[in-house]
Structure formats: C-alpha cells, structure tokens
Image: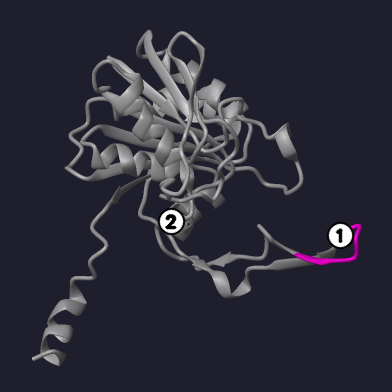
Amino acid sequence: MRILLTNDDGINAPGLNVLERIARQFSDDIWICAPSEEQSGAGHSLTLTRPVRLHQHAERRFSVTGTPTDALTMGLKKVLPEPPDLILSGVNRGANLGDDVTYSGTVSAAIEGALAGVRSIALSQVYSKEGVGDAVSFAAAEEWGGKVLKPLIDAPFAPRTLVNVNFPPLAAGEVKGIRVVRQGFHDYARGSVVEGTDPRGYRYFWFGLHGIEHTPGHDSDLEAIADGFISVTPLHLDLTHDPSIAMLKERFG
C-alpha cells in the first residue's frame, strides 16, 4: 500500500514525524510532500499568483513552497510515480474541530485528496494551553494513531468524503476511547483580536485562539474531545443546504 503524507505545519514539523511512524505500521511505501514552512489557517487555498518550487530532501521526501493544497497537488502530479492508496494529513499541532475545519490547511489537504478520488484522512493533536510552541505533546496521537487508522484503511468511503480525526490533550493512558461523532460548531462572536504596539510604535493585530465557545449538549467532535475521547468525524464536500432549495425556487418563481 502506497501512502502519501502531508500537513500544514511544514516539512520539519514534529507532528509529521509522528505521522510517518504511524503510517509505517501499515506500509513501507511512504512518500512525503509537505509545505516548506508552516501554513496554518491556509484553508483550501491554491497558489496562483507566483510559482511554487519543489525541493527534494531525501528519497521520497519533498517540500513545496506553497500551501497544503499546493503540496498535495504536487505530490499527486509531480512526485509520486503512481497515485497513492491512502493520503494522511497531519498530525496537526492543535485542534481542527467544529467550524474550524474550513480554516484548516490540514483538513483542506485531505479535502484535495478526496477530490482526487483517494481515501484521505486528517489527523490533529489537540493541546490545552496557548503559548506552548513546539512543546505540544503528541503522546495520544502516537499511541492511538494506529488504532484509529486500522478500521479506516479498508472502510468503504463514499465518493468526495474524508475523515477528520482529533486526539484529546491527554496522556495516552488517559484517553477514554474513540467516538464517531458529527462536526460541532463554535460561537465565533466570542473570539478575540489581540491588539498591540510594535517596537516602532505602530499598532498591530493578532487573531487570538482563545475565547471561542461552543454549544454543548449535542454529540459532536467538540464534546468528544472535552470528554477525553478521540473524535472521528466523516466530512463531505457538498455544501448545498438542501432544505433551502424549495424556498429559493419559490422566491425566484
């Protein structure tokens, strides 16, 4: 089985090394094509206004000067000799839960894989404190990654679907298990924009990662992580809101 790995934290990210160790539990035919630098929050963006460059670091290990979507596309079209059987994106440093999947470069790389008709899975390690930098523990992902992937390797994915996996911010032995849940939603009205002044006296703004609440009381990825479980969420790419079609047809005659 040929597996293509990518991420949005960059080719040198610790989580990518974790993902490679997880992937090698299932195959020795591992290829890596990831962004040259961190691209968190890049979403499903594609670089169109400047060239992207492909760099080879070792056998079957490449980086791309662009977004996660760029990296995945280059991996499929320029790096691999044949299409992979599986695409794994991650392990992201931080959560990709609820509505945040729309911002996520990690999830978006898996979306691009699904669009290409390849079984694709995004994996993210939640952490509980801000300002920890590279000190994020991937212990839960390292221990549980293979256990989560094993049932998914030959599962019958529907066309244009992917799976989003999040590991809770716990020691591996404290994880309570795995829950298959729906995507949750945040209250973005409570998000924060941090304002400061740079050394030259100019104002700047930094989008904060704290203060965004979610609505509890439903079986979602947010609730699963809060309860100490790994969340496994199937996502699909059809954004049509079917209940609104009849209403709009009526309004447009």
Q: Quadrant of residue 114?
A: top left
Q: In this orientation, does residue 178 appear?
A: no
The stretch drawn in magenta includes residue 200: yes
Coordinates of residue 74 in the picture (x, y in percent): 37, 30
Of badges 2 and 1, nearer the viewer stands: 1
Q: Quadrant of residue 171?
A: top right
Q: Nearer the viewer, residue 119 or 128?
A: 119
Q: Amino acid at mark 1?
A: Asp
Separation of marks 2 and 1 at Cα, in angstroms: 30 Å
Coordinates of residue 81 in the picture (x, y in percent): 27, 15
Mark 1, residues whose alpha carbon is within 10 Å: few (<14), some, or many (≥20)?
few
Q: Which residues are magenta?
A: 199-204
* Count of marks overlaid on the render: 2
Disc with the residue nearer the chain's start (2 vs 1): 2
Q: Residue furthest left?
A: 253
**Residue shown at the point (46%, 8%) measured from the top left:** 59
Q: Amino acid at mark 2?
A: Thr
* Render colour scheme: one colour
Mark 2, residues whose alpha carbon is within 10 Å: few (<14), some, or many (≥20)?
some
Q: On residue 102, which mark appears?
A: 2
What residue is pinned by disc 1?
198
Q: Answer above or below: position of 10 versus 101.
A: above
